[in-house]
Image (spheres, helix red, strand yellow):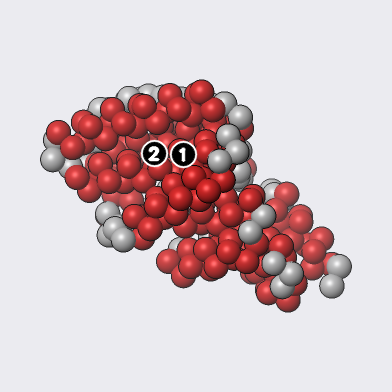
Amino acid sequence: DAKAKVLVDQIAALSKQEYPNIAVFTAVAVVPARYALERGDWAGAAKLPVVSTGRAQADSLVRFTRGLGMARSGDLAGAKGEIQAMQDLRTALEKSNQSYWADRTEEQMLAVSGWIAYAEGTRDQARKLMRAAADNEDASVKHVAMENRLYPMRELLGELLLQIGQGAAAEREFEASLKENPNRYRGLYGAARAAEAAGDRPKAAGYFEKLVALASKADTVRPETARAKAFLGQR
């Protein structure tokens, strides 16, 4: 995380400029977004600065990060505002005949809406919205500008199901996500927690072992790694 923060600061110090293609715009946008999301720093995600790039695809990634952070840290009004901002970006993408990116923004809106619904206590609606986001993303083809999903929607569905208390269902979603996005730190942690919640301690241990191995050269110890080590030490 320490080295990642150095990169985040370097990106923030870059002057706004015209990059050669959309891949660079999205890359610059997702560095600080990933730093917050991958660490589960929802308050930090909610405070991600809004700096218009002039590219709706990149701007939507920032709005999604902010909206998810707000929804998961209690600022539901703010999250709804981010959905409206994404709707405006989606409309702009449709008008410029960029249906691929418009669909990605739609998935982001569905996901944030799902977490808002969860926070508001409408769990069935939350599952419906989040599953729609996951199914739509899985049916799409990855774009060269975003070969790695900012935050796999199926993994996010797993997190929602885990929050609701459906460990076995969450485990299935995490495992499906890991097939498409192998060795993701949050994916492995989610799968381990889901297996633990479902009562499958041997499988949970297997995922926790992979998580610890993945983080073996990390320059900081995340709470998730500490929890994994504690679980493994209890066997």
Label placed on residue 109: 2
Give the percent coordinates (x, y) of residue 178.
50, 66
> Which residue position is annotated with label 1?
112
Residue 44, given in percent of the width and then of the height, sits at 58, 32
For the question of whether residue 7 can be seen, the reply is: no
The amino acid marked with disc number 2 is: Met
Write down the quadrant of residue 137 in the picture. bottom left
Q: Which numbered marker is on residue 174?
A: none
Amino acid type, residue under disc 1 in the picture: Val
Q: Is residue 166 visible?
A: yes
Taking the spot 80% from the left edge, 64% from the top edge, the residue there is 231
Q: Secondary structure at mark 1?
A: helix
163 is higher (above) or lower (below) than 122: below
Q: Which residue shows up at 27% across the image and 46% down it?
A: 103
Q: Is residue 159 above or below residue 214?
A: above
Q: Which of the pair 106/17 is nearer the observer?
A: 106
